[in-house]
Image (tube, rainbow, N blue to C red):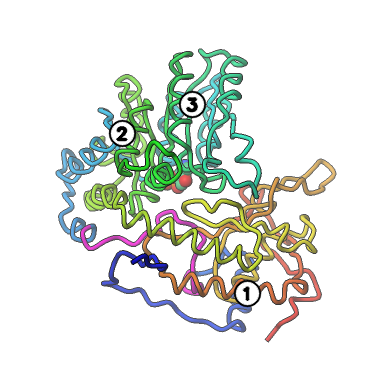
Amino acid sequence: MHFKTVIEPFRIKMVEPIHMSTEKERRNYLKEAKNNLFLLESEKVIIDLLTDSGTSAMSAQQWGGIMMGDESYAGAKSWEKMRKAIFDLTGYDYILPIHQGRAGESILYSQLGGKGKVFISNTHFDTTRANIEYSGALAVDCLSEQGKQPALEHPFKGNIDVKKLEQTILKHGAESIGAVVLTVTNNSGGGQPVSMQNAKDVRAICDKYQVLFLLDCCRIAENSYFVAQREQAYKNVSYRAIAQEMFALSDGAVMSAKKDALVNMGGFIALRDKKIADACANMLIMKEGFVTYGGLSGRDMEALAIGLVEVFDKDYLHYRISSTTYLGDKLTALGVPVIRPIGGHAVYVDAKTFYDHIPVDEYPGHALACDLYLKGGIRACEIGSVMFGKYSESGELIPAQMELVRLAIPRRVYTQSHLDYVVETFEAVLAEKQSSKGMKIIYEPAFLRHFTAHFARLLPEYASVV
Ligand SMILES: *Cc1c(COP(=O)(O)O)cnc(C)c1O
């Protein structure tokens, strides 16, 4: 018998109550937070889809492991477990612990980067780009053309454009290329996967020009699931073996373990090259901690070692990707425009199309994110002109390429009924779509304004004030 419902492949052993609020209460909460969802206390949120980073629920095994944490300064048993888990997966000899992804990026790119160096990616994640640029180097994105078309159905929209990659290497000269960094899955491009063939093509080009090939592998397990589903040759290969093959193709990796290692904090740098690793180790000791803990507690390292194995469980990954797809497909059926196909960790709503009556300088994505909160207590994240907009010299908004609202799904946290509730919230927002108004910014800082800006709703206020 084939079941329609993909159930959560776990039972709930410990619960965290959700404070239910009314629309009227949320209207006040949002006002107090200056209409900025980042300024809301999490207790005032019913379903928190702000990010999938560091928000995973840990298993009983991981919590059990936490009690075994060895907190020795040097040579802790817990480090040995973490090192072994990473070595078994990546096959790299030189492994350094870090407290989260950007700490590893700061260390690695301070060593590989510098003025005159160029790093080429499918899409550099924001913190990756920032750390590369901070070193004085240049960060270039070469995403495939398919990856740039939100509505296009294509199995691997995270692929790098190998032709452009080669042209970029030739343009700058192979000796100035710091590394090619393949982000799997491509977070900034909608959580879209990268094929094994693409990784093989990158390897071949890196061999031809003697260039370093790195993985930004935060979501390598989710990427492996897509490879098994969509790349014929990998139909019968285990998810773990697929990940191992991708690591075998590359020379090193940085991982934010807050994603696919199913922990709330942690990460690693793993490398084949001893010289680079030694240089990074010096920086690690200076910035994060000794080489056998790197800013992590022994208990964190235990949980990470266990999570990195659990994430490749075939029932877990099937449920994980199915539940993201479930939400995306239900929204599509309602007529909500979303980026296709649905990626691994999030559903991205195209707010420019959804609120086509709100011009981009009135921030349709931010208006939608606020409406989802008001109607259902859902916290989503605007990825549009609030986050990436700039101003021209005359003070006019230069909008972002797209006005998106990201619904990121924390791992093992919400059930299908929570997602049904999200769908119902969208129904309520859709019903009053035309009466929703845009937003204006009434205060903004000089940098990263989305975190702390204050907003006001353009008048007259949202129609359904209760
Ligand atoms: C989250 C993330 C990072 C940075 O990791 P942090 O743990 O948040 O510092 C880097 N790259 C990608 C692709 C990410 O998703």
- How many residues crowd around disc 2 within 10 Å: few (fewer than 14), some, or many (20 or more)? some
Residue 43 on the magenta segment:
yes
Q: Secondary structure at mark 1?
A: helix
Kind of residue sitting beneath label 1: Glu
Percent coordinates x, y for residue 111 in the rendering = 42, 25
Figure check: 146 above or below 397:
above
Badge 3 crowding class, 10 Å Cα cut-off, few under 14, some 14 to 19, many 20 or more, is: many
Numbered mark located on residue 285 in the image = 2
Which of the numbered marks, if any, corresponds to residue 180?
A: 3
Q: Residue furthest bottom?
A: 466
Residue 84 placement (x, y as % from top left)? 20, 38
Which residue position holds label 1?
A: 427
Residue 452 showing in the rendered view: no
User: In the rendered view, would you say 440 is above or below 313?
Assistant: below
Q: Secondary structure at mark 2?
A: helix
Which numbered mark, 2 or 1, is in the foreground of this view?
A: 1
- Residue at horizontal 37 percent and vertical 27 percent from the top: 249
Distance Cα–Cα, label 2 vs label 1: 52 Å
The magenta-colored residue range is: 42-61
Q: Is residue 53 left or right of residue 352?
A: left
Residue found at the far right of this picture: 394
Calculate the distance from the C-alpha at mark 1 to the C-alpha at mark 3. 43 Å
Q: Quadrant of the C terminus?
A: bottom right
Specify few, some or many for label 1: CA neighbours under 10 Å numbering under 14, 14-19, or 20 or more: some
Label 3, ligand 1: CB separation under 8 Å: no
Q: Position of residue 421 (x, y in %)?
A: 51, 75
Find residue 273 and report its image quarter.
Answer: top left
- Image quarter hosting the N terminus: bottom left
